[in-house]
Amino acid sequence: MFRFTFCSIGYFVVLFLVFLILVTYSPITLSAEAYTKLPPVNFPSENPFSEPKRLLGKILFWDEQLSTDNSVACGTCHIPAAAGADPRIANGPGYDEKLGTPDDIWGSLGVKARDHQGKLSKNKHFHYRQQVTSRAAQSYFSGLWSDLNFWDGRAGSQFLDPQTGKVLIKQGGALENQALGPLFSAVEMAKAEQRPQELIDKLRQSSPLALATAWPVDVAQAIENNPSYSALFERAFGDSEITLARIIFAITTYERTLVANQTPWDQAMQGVKPLSYQQNLGWEFFKQSGCTDCHKPPLFTDNKFYNIGIQGQNADLGQSAITGNKAHIGLMKVPSLRNVGLKKTFMHTGQQHSLGQVIDVYAKVPFKSIASKKPNGELYNFQFTEFQRKAIIEFMQHALTDERVKHELYPFDRPQLRSEKPAVNGQQAPEVQPLGVSFLVTETGSSVPKIDWQKRDKNAELIDIEIVRNDGYHFWASRSPFIDYTAKAGKTYQYTLYGRTADFVKSKGHEVEVHIPGSWLDKLMRYFD
């Protein structure tokens, strides 16, 4: 007869504990959970999907020619392998308005400050260097399902035509509003007081992706078949007219196809492949600790706004600057944690540079007195053992990473940008020779100058040219001829053309004088001159 002894009881206790651990933390239990897959991306009825429009949007998104001085593309600050955020780390002044202090913001490098003519101007903090944004770049992947975009939610659901003010999208246009902002930000991509028509005129004479190399296959095929932006717009929209609204519609059509839904977590939840033991532990701790209160699966965000107390009162007004509601001071949008393991900086300040630092902030909130409460009414106070901490980091670092994003595989593939090319010390920029001037009659009947040019040394690498007009206006072009759509009838201009290398080294300038035809009286006076 079997007799229970102290040792046998201990044996069964150990077996029972092992059973509990296996039931609680086994990868098998994960596949049994109710799986809610990512919702389908909603394309607004006013901006439906088409493949030609997606291709145009992909080209525009990665074209540095959309910036005033050809230095920044939309994608410059939103690299897929960095989770759709910015892998570059640059600091700007925080609330104290001083550089190099603990409250510095780690944002994105933008453009050098330029006045309304495109002339370099001295910035208070960065002088003649590239400026840095006042918040860290968000991943553009997570904006696909949101009614409010940007950290402060200023990109709302209704989208107006930026040129006419007409309502183009009644609801569901937050992504369109988000895509529009950087194109006219004097920190991110534009000169001061950039006008929509200036960007449109520039695209009309630009070769698509002229500054980039290593084009993806689909992009290369599209440009081979439609080698100008006019042709690409005609393919996407039915005619060759380039408008700002169409630029935005194309970019957001491309963005809405970037759905990172092939993570290990997705596969485990579908029963395809279980998470690793430590990732599964991290997932359990992630749920038990309340992280999912705000970072709700499957988006891993609730798209709401909270103040988690990482900055003092009024350091960044957050959503309050948009709503005017004092109760919204410091509220920032909850970012998605999908692909968070690929990011280089975290939070809207970019001050945390690892997931471990992020967890430590939640364990010891710097400004707890002004922090929002969690959705369940509790204060932020996440206390983890080192074992739990490592497991949660492992879960976020790897279980939420889509390998296509990490390795920039289709549809997350992209070209190499001009700004990514290594600088060549001592490299001389090839000089540009003006060849001749002709005139283009515009839709309004006025004549504008066309300046043909070529590089003097055919073997030298020329990336683009900078054109300076004698009244102070600056222009940038990647192909000949350069067309000055802003020239006034009856005026005489001197243009100086400079060649530029990949790292923006300028050559010696060469001048050409152009007189713009005016009225019959002006022509008669010039005849007798």
Image (cartoon, rainbow, N blue to C red):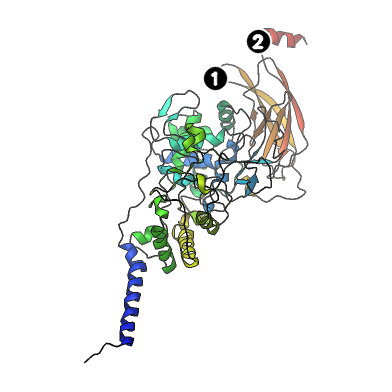
Query: Which residue reaches farthest bottom?
Result: 1
Q: Which residue is mark 1?
A: 443
Residue type marked 1: Glu
State if disc 2 and disc 1 touch (CB < 8 Å): no
Element at badge 1? loop
Residue 260: x and y in percent read 43, 52
Give the distance between the C-alpha atoms of the residues marked 1 and 2, in whole angstroms: 17 Å
- Identify which residue, 58 or 245, lies in the foreground: 245
Q: How many marks?
A: 2
Q: Is residue 346 above or below residue 243?
A: below
Which picture quadrant has residue 228?
Answer: top right
Q: Is residue 390 above or below residue 446?
A: below
Q: Left or right? Give the position of 414 relative to 68.
A: left
Residue 459: x and y in percent read 72, 45
Element at badge 2? loop
Which picture quadrant has residue 136?
Answer: top right
Checking the image for residue 519, the label placed there is: 2
Q: Earlier in the sequence, mark 1 or mark 2?
A: 1
The 10 Å Cα crowd at callout 2, few under 14, some 14 to 19, many 20 or more, is few
Residue type marked 2: Ser
Residue drawn at the location 72% of the way across and 45% of the way down: 460
Residue drawn at the location 70% of the way across and 43% of the way down: 501
User: Can residue 375 be spotted in the picture?
Assistant: yes
User: Can residue 154 be spotted in the picture?
Assistant: no
- Identify which residue, 154 or 79, lies in the foreground: 154
Residue 127: x and y in percent read 72, 38
Q: Left or right? Give the position of 397 relative to 452.
A: left
Q: Left or right? Give the position of 113 relative to 277.
A: right
